[in-house]
Amino acid sequence: MKRLTDLVSAFAKGIAHSRISLIGAMIVTVVCPFLLGALIYDAVWHIDNTYFSFAIYMILGPTFITGLIMVFLGLFFFKGKEEVRLFTLEYLQGYFTDPSKFNRLRKLVFVAVFLTCVNLFIFGLLGYSGYHYMESTGFCGQFCHTVMDPEYTAYQNSPHSRVSCVECHIGPGAGWFVKSKISGARQLAAVTLESYPRPIETPVHGLRPARDTCEQCHRPQIFHGGKLVVKDKFLPDEQNTHVQTVLLMKIGSAGDRTVSPHGIHWHVAPENRIVYRAADWEREKIPLVTLAKSDGTEVVYRTEDAEEVLGQDTEQGLREMDCIDCHNRPTHIYLPPDRAIDNKILSGDIPLDIPFIKKKAMEVVKVEYASHEEAREGIAERLNEWYRQNHAEFLSANPNLLPKAIEGIQAAYTENVFPKMNIQWGTYTSHLGHENDLGCFRCHDEMHESESGETISMDCNTCHTILAEEETSPEILHLLQGE
């Protein structure tokens, strides 16, 4: 017990020589138990609250390290002129040759080694858990709430909602990690200074190569055959008539189960290499497309104004087509208003029995609101007022339906429109398909022509076969179901 007291006393005297060391020691003493307890709890049971995790890894952790640095600096560099002799070789030799002095030095070394082991244990936990925290979806999507709220909300409602952000945005290895952290530091500064763009630009030019991301899970080279797609839509009439479009999507490409490239994924088949040059940053206007065939020949398709738009240097800015050129929003998907409302009706969040609910829902969500709060109030007020005036008897007979519909319509709005970030309906374009944006028609417009007069086809049957188009109870579905 006395030896332990002597050890503590010797170490305390060393720290007491410097005010900086003393302040650092106080910081470490106060922070250490909280930090160590939180690290162990997070490692064993996991902390879900991203803000509490931020306090641990971005506040307590750096504070603890700062305290240790202050102790070190105070012990070795800020002890006053009378302590300079402690760093001379003669003084240290005296400590090692004098038995009485060496015993004191040994005690200090023991204390230093013990505390170093404790610190290394804390550093290990802090580094391991902190790394995983900074790679977590919560940190990416929830910490900078105002900025990332639209992207995080869209991510949660996407087909990739169980794929972590870093799977697509950060590649393996130290290089991508360093790039992401440098970019993150710049973004953090922009958030702090409120200099970030509103809305956030789509990072099409800054994403990892699609072959390194998408194709870790998806394998277009073995896609083959067709896929039946049923699109549900509700008309803006009194009955909210349910109509369906049935498509046979030709999703094939090429590979071990096909004879030749075919279908939608023909664009990324190994037998083909498609290179294009866009005239704008968003890659919506594409005047020049080059197809390199498996036999070594090339076909160049140009629009009439290609040279005027691109200039004479047609080699500059060439890009090889990959997944992102069509699936430019595979995760952060913002729906157009009709699809958002149709999806809520289809899921039952908006009761179909309410007369004109599709029509009125479309009207109220297209009003420009200043915030989500104002949107919720405005949607509820407008719908309640209209139905009180026009369908009071229906409301009396079905008092629970309209409140449920209002919640569903409010959700359709708040999941896709974010006024604080200047995101309205249609702010972000989608290149997949051609329902609301140009999409496929950026190239498939029969205006891209080769020197031989061949054009890029606009034929609907190139990518899909229409089996039914906005029909009520399509016959093809009954046939497929054996009815």
Image (tube, rainbow, N blue to C red):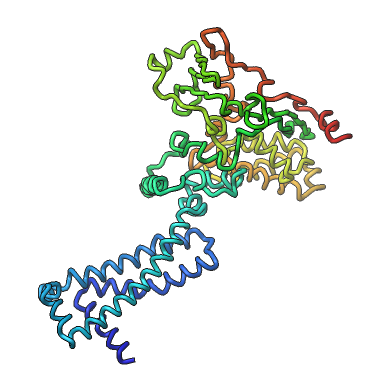
How far across and how far down the image is residue 390, in percent?
75, 38
Residue, far top: 452
State left or right for residue 34 relative to residue 442.
Answer: left
Does residue 187 show up? no
> Which residue is drawn at the image coordinates 26% and 78% (left, top)?
109
Assign the C terminus to one quadrant of the image: top right
State left or right for residue 201 relative to residue 353.
Answer: left
How far across and how far down the image is residue 240, in percent?
76, 34
**Total labels drawn:** 0
Does residue 80 show up? yes
Relative to 384, say whether 117 is above or below. Answer: below
State left or right for residue 81 relative to residue 348.
Answer: left
> Which residue is drawn at the image coordinates 50% and 15% (left, top)?
300
Residue, far right: 483
Quadrant of the image occupied by residue 217: top right
**Along the viewing direction, whichever of 257 and 234 lies nearer the viewer:** 257
**Along the viewing direction, whichever of 259 and 357 lies nearer the viewer:** 259
Quadrant of the image occupied by residue 280: top left
**Along the viewing direction, whichever of 108 and 257 lies nearer the viewer:** 257
Relative to 329, say whether 44 is above or below. Answer: below
Quadrant of the image occupied by residue 72: bottom left
Residue, far bottom: 2
> Which residue is drawn at the image coordinates 46% and 45% (left, top)?
171
How far across and how far down the image is residue 287, in percent?
48, 17
Assign the N terminus to one quadrant of the image: bottom left
